[in-house]
Amino acid sequence: MNVSDYLASRLLNGVFRNTAYTFPDTVYIALYTSDPMAADTGQEVSGGAYVRKTVTFTASALENGKQTIKNSADIEFPVATADWGTVTHIGIRDAATGGNLLYFGALTAPRTILSGDRFKLLTNSLVLTLR
């Protein structure tokens, strides 16, 4: 997973310039059919009952020399009522709609979501690290 331009700026200015940053109370998983990239320019899934889903994370722990957090529960999207396309990336955002991209990354195996399918991320499958 990668840090977005938005979050990188907020963290650097907050830590090294004492610039206030209001942390989000809730973060959401978004699905993409293209790489959102650090600048938040990807194509998010839309329509067909798609909605972003909330995610909660474990406390950070040192794992393989990196501070790591993981999703603490399964993240299950609604059943698609239309084709969503091939989901290639996920993003973590600070709002249920709109908002800012925080982290993003490619799926290990892209998945085509057709009407009647349900996309699900299993517990501990979403891993975020800082070195």
Image (cartoon, rainbow, N blue to C red):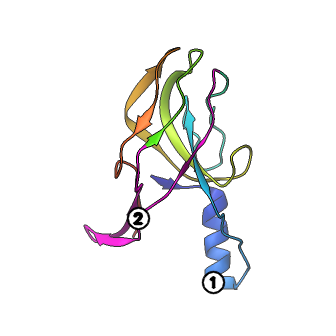
The amino acid beneath tag 2 is Thr
Q: Label 2: state its secondary structure.
A: loop
The image shows residue 58 at horizontal and vertical percentages of 41, 64
2 vs 1, front mark: 2
In the depicted structure, whether residue 119 falls above or below residue 1: above
Identify the residue shown where x is 56% and y is 15%: 83
The image shows residue 102 at horizontal and vertical percentages of 60, 56
In the depicted structure, whether residue 49 falls above or below residue 29: above
Magenta-drawn segment? 48-74
Quadrant placement of the C terminus: bottom left
Is the residue marked by circle 2 packed among few (<14), some (14-19), or many (20+) residues within 10 Å?
few
Query: Which residue bears the numbered disc 1?
Result: 16
Q: Taking 43 as reference, is 65 left or right?
A: left
Name the disc covering residue 68, or none.
Answer: none
User: Of residues 38 and 114, which is closer to you in this image?
Assistant: 114
Name the disc covering residue 58, or none.
Answer: 2
User: Of residues 35 and 61, which is closer to you in this image?
Assistant: 61
**Residue 108 found in image quarter:** top left
The mark total stands at: 2
The amino acid beneath tag 1 is Phe
User: Of residues 86 and 79, which is closer to you in this image?
Assistant: 79
